[in-house]
Amino acid sequence: MVQDLERAGIRSGHVLAAMGSVPREAFVPAAVRADAYGDHALPIGHGQTISQPYVVARMLEALDLQGDERVLDVGTGSGYVAALLGELAEDVVSIERVPELAATASTVLQALGSANVRVVVGDGSRGWLEAAPYDAIMVAAAGPEVPASLLAQLAPGGRLVMPVGDDSAQDLLLLHRTDDGALERRCLGLVRFVPLVGSEGWTGPN
Ligand code: SAH
């Protein structure tokens, strides 16, 4: 999988090393485990998916983590991205709205020894104020726009990656808050994620 990612253009040694060391198979249901290292999303139950490795790698690379950051991961899902962030940063809070997914992810993360990752249950479209501000925020579900609460919880110098758009396709956005507080915005390409369901995401039945 790591060689495929390198061939696809992922350059960050840190990201490639983390993706080589976190076992993706531990985060997917037994029924799809044989497929754990293919470059595609896989079902994890509750209508949700573990994201495609290449897209995860692009997002992690864009965050440009150095190892000393406090990170917010929105949409824990399987916990796979949370584990990777735990390898790349100092401290990770991962928030999930579906309690069952959060519980399973938490068990796997504990079993793998990801001691610097904390999973909480809640509406991550509003961020997680208790541990704010964050040096990096990674959102694994697509919203109509970047939630104001997430921007408010992003520290100066911080970066946020998130898919923004409707349910057919989204722009993968990278926002960088410069040290003087301004926001720089870049689009990394088109992606397709499950919806961010919450008060600052998509509301109503999905
Ligand atoms: N990073 C995950 C990807 C999971 S898919 C992984 O590595 O497996 C996105 C997840 O976002 C789903 O589990 C979904 O339930 C969750 N989600 C959607 N809206 C949310 C919200 N407002 N707050 C927290 N989690 C949310």
Image: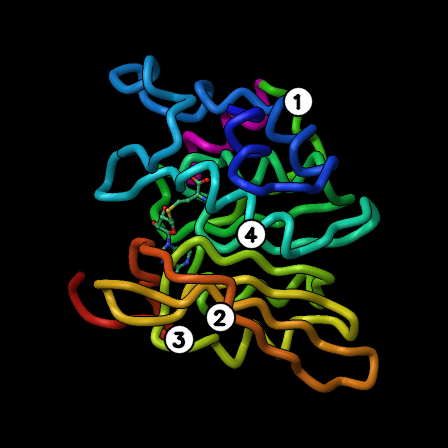
Alpha carbon distance from label 2 to label 3: 6 Å
Q: Earlier in the sequence, mark 1 or mark 2?
A: 1
Left or right, 103 with respect to 132, comes to left
- In the rendered structure, which amino acid carries the disc numbered 1? Gly
Percent x, y of residue 125? 44, 67
Label drawn at residue 113: 1
Rounded to the nearest angstrom, the CA distance separating label 1 from label 2 is: 28 Å
- Circles 2 and 3: CB atoms closer than 8 Å: yes
- Residue holding disc 2: 126
Disc 3 residue type (three-letter): Glu
| Label 3 or label 4, whichever comes before in sequence order | 4
CA gap between label 3 and label 4 equals 21 Å
Q: Secondary structure at mark 3?
A: loop
Name which of mark 2 and mark 3 comes first in the sequence.
2
206 is higher (above) or lower (below) than 32: below
Q: Look at the numbered disc 2 and give the secondary structure of its residue.
A: helix
Establish whether ligand 1 lies closer than 8 Å to the Cβ of label 3: yes
Residue under pointer 3: 200
The mark closer to the camera, 4 or 1, is 4
Q: Report which quarter residue 163 is drawn in.
A: bottom left
Residue 183 appears left or right of 68: left
The span shown in magenta is 102-111
Q: CA distance from mark 3 to mark 1?
A: 33 Å
Residue wearing tag 4 = 59
* Label 4 beta carbon within 8 A of ligand 1: no
Q: Position of residue 88 (x, y in %)?
A: 72, 40
Amino acid type indicated by mark 4: Met
